[in-house]
Image (cartoon, rainbow, N blue to C red):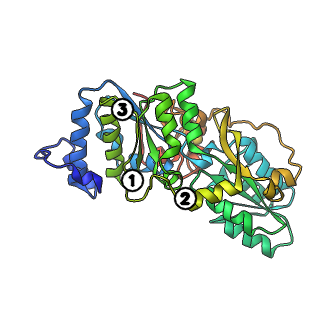
C-alpha cells in the first residue's frame, strides 16, 4: 500500500501517541502520517477540506481524527448521505403512494424520515403496507408474489445505481421505482460554483469512486483549481488523503489522486458504468438544502418509463416542507456542524429525530450524537 512508503520519520515522541495507540490498528503508520501532516501544515494558512461520504464522517468521528489535526486544518462534512439529501417532496411522494394502499418498499433508514408531515413509519403504523428490504432485488421478488402494485424507493449515489439498473431488467408489470438517485460530482461542482464556502480540497468518496473512477472529478479540479484525493475507509486512509491534499495545496497542484488504489481503478467499474449508461437518463434535481442541481439525478430511460412510479401514477403532492428549525440543509452544505443546530441533542435525538441527518446512520447529526462530537466551525 502506498502509505507504507512513508519512512524515515522520527516517531520517538508524538503528542497524541497514547490516544493513537488505543484507536488505530496501524499505529505506527498513523503516527508517521500525522507527523507529516503537522509538519506540512505549519507553513500553510487555514485550510478547509470537505468530504462527501457518510462513511468517511463515521471514520473521522469514531477515531477522533479532527482532534488529531493541527489547528489550521479543518475537515467538514458535505452532502454524502443519500438518505439526508432526499427532499421532503420525495418522502411525501412515497407517503402518498403508501397511503393509496400500494406496497412501498424501502431501505430501513428511510422509514423514519419525515416528509412535510408524515414518515413512512407513520403510514405503516396506520396500517399501510411499507416493507423494509435490503436490496432492490428483494423488492422485485415481492412484486412477483403480490397482486398489488409495488413501488421501491430507488435511493443512493453512483454506488447503488447499478443495482437499480439491473432490476429494471427483472421487474414485473406491477413494479416501479420512485427514482431518488443522485450523482456526487455535480453536487461538488455546485458547492464550488456557489461560492458559499471556500473549500481548499475534496476527500472524494471511495465507494462512489469504485464505480465512476477518477475521470468525472478531473474537470472540477481544472475548473476550480482544487485538489482531490479518493480515500478508502481505514483511519490511515483518511489521514493519508488529508496529507496528500495538503501536499498538493503546498505545491499549488490541482489534481485528482487516488489513495484507495487497492480498490479504485482509474476508469472505475466499466461494466457498471455501461449498465448505468444504458439504463438511465441524467436529470436536474433538487437536493435537500440545495436548489435544483444540474445533471445530478437519474431516472430510467424511455424504454423503462413503465417502471417509473412518477409516470405510472398520478402523484399529487406539493413542493414539500423542511421540518421546522432543522438545519440539515446547512449541514449538508458544510456551513455548520451538527452541534450548531439549536435542536441537536435537545429536541432532536436518534429516538426522536427531527431531520434525516439524525435518522440515517450516515447522517452527520446521528454520527455526532453517537460519538458526542462537539465541534463547531473553526
Ligand atoms: Fe436537523 Fe436534528 Fe440535525 Fe438539527 S440536529 S439539523 S434538527 S437532524
Lower position in the chain sequence, tag 3 or tag 2: 3
When the figure is inspected, residue 287 is found, relative to residue 25, above or below; the finding is above
Q: Are marks 3 and 2 in contact (CB under 8 Å)?
A: no
- In the image, taking residue 331 as reference, residue 20 lies left or right, namely left
- In the image, taking residue 10 as reference, residue 28 lies left or right, namely right
- For disc 2, the marked residue is 270
Residue 260 has which mark? 1
* Alpha carbon distance from label 1 to label 3: 19 Å
Residue 260: % across, % down = 39, 53
Q: Is mark 2 within 8 Å of ligand 1?
A: no
Lower position in the chain sequence, tag 1 or tag 3: 3
* Alpha carbon distance from label 3 to label 2: 28 Å
When the figure is inspected, residue 51 is found, relative to residue 150, above or below; the finding is above
Residue 3: % across, % down = 27, 51
- For disc 3, the marked residue is 253
- In the image, taking residue 132 as reference, residue 209 lies left or right, namely left
At horizontal 73% and vertical 44% (from top left) the residue drawn is: 115
* Alpha carbon distance from label 2 to label 1: 17 Å
Amino acid at each position: 500500500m502506498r502509505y507504507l512508503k512513508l519512512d524515515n520519520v522520527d516517531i520517538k515522541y508524538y503528542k497524541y501517541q497514547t490516544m493513537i495507540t488505543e484507536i488505530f490498528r496501524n499505529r505506527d503508520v498513523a503516527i508517521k502520517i500525522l507527523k507529516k501532516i503537522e509538519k506540512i501544515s505549519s507553513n500553510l494558512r487555514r485550510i478547509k477540506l470537505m468530504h462527501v461520504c457518510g462513511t468517511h464522517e463515521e471514520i473521522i468521528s469514531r477515531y477522533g481524527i479532527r482532534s488529531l489535526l493541527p489547528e489550521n486544518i479543518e475537515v467538514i462534512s458535505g452532502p454524502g448521505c443519500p438518505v439526508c439529501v432526499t427532499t421532503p417532496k420525495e418522502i411525501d411522494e412515497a407517503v402518498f403512494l403508501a397511503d393509496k394502499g400500494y406496497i412501498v418498499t424501502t431501505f430501513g433508514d428511510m422509514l423514519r424520515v419525515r416528509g412535510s408531515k408524515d414518515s413512512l413509519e407513520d403510514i405503516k403504523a396506520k396500517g399501510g403496507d411499507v416493507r423494509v428490504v435490503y436490496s432492490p432485488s428483494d423488492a422485485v421478488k415481492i412484486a412477483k408474489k403480490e397482486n398489488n402494485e409495488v413501488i421501491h424507493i430507488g435511493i443512493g449515489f453512483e454506488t447503488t445505481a447499478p443495482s437499480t439498473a439491473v432490476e429494471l431488467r427483472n421487474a414485473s408489470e406491477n413494479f416501479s421505482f420512485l427514482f431518488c438517485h443522485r450523482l456526487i460530482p455535480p453536487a461538488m461542482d455546485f458547492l464550488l460554483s456557489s461560492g458559499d464556502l471556500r473549500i481548499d480540497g475534496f476527500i472524494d468518496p471511495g465507494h462512489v469512486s469504485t464505480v465512476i473512477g477518477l475521470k468525472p472529478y478531473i474537470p472540477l479540479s481544472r475548473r476550480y483549481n482544487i485538489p482531490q484525493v479518493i480515500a478508502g475507509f481505514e483511519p490511515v486512509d483518511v489521514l493519508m488523503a488529508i496529507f496528500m491534499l495538503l501536499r498538493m495545496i503546498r505545491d499549488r497542484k490541482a489534481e485528482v489522486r487516488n489513495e484507495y488504489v487497492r480498490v479504485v481503478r482509474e476508469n472505475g467499474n466499466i461494466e457498471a458504468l455501461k449498465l448505468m449508461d444504458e439504463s438511465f437518463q441524467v436529470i436536474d434535481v433538487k437536493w435537500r438544502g440545495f436548489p435544483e442541481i444540474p445533471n445530478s439525478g437519474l431516472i430510467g430511460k424511455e424504454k423503462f418509463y413503465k417502471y417509473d412510479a412518477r409516470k405510472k401514477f398520478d402523484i399529487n403532492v406539493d413542493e414539500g416542507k423542511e421540518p421546522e428549525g432543522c438545519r440539515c440543509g446547512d449541514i449538508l452544505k458544510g456551513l455548520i456542524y451538527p452541534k450548531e443546530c439549536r435542536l441537536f441533542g435537545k429536541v432532536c435525538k436518534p429516538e426522536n429525530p427531527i431531520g434525516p441527518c439524525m435518522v440515517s446512520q450516515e447522517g452527520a447529526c446521528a454520527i455526532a450524537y453517537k460519538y458526542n462530537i462537539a465541534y463547531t466551525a473553526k
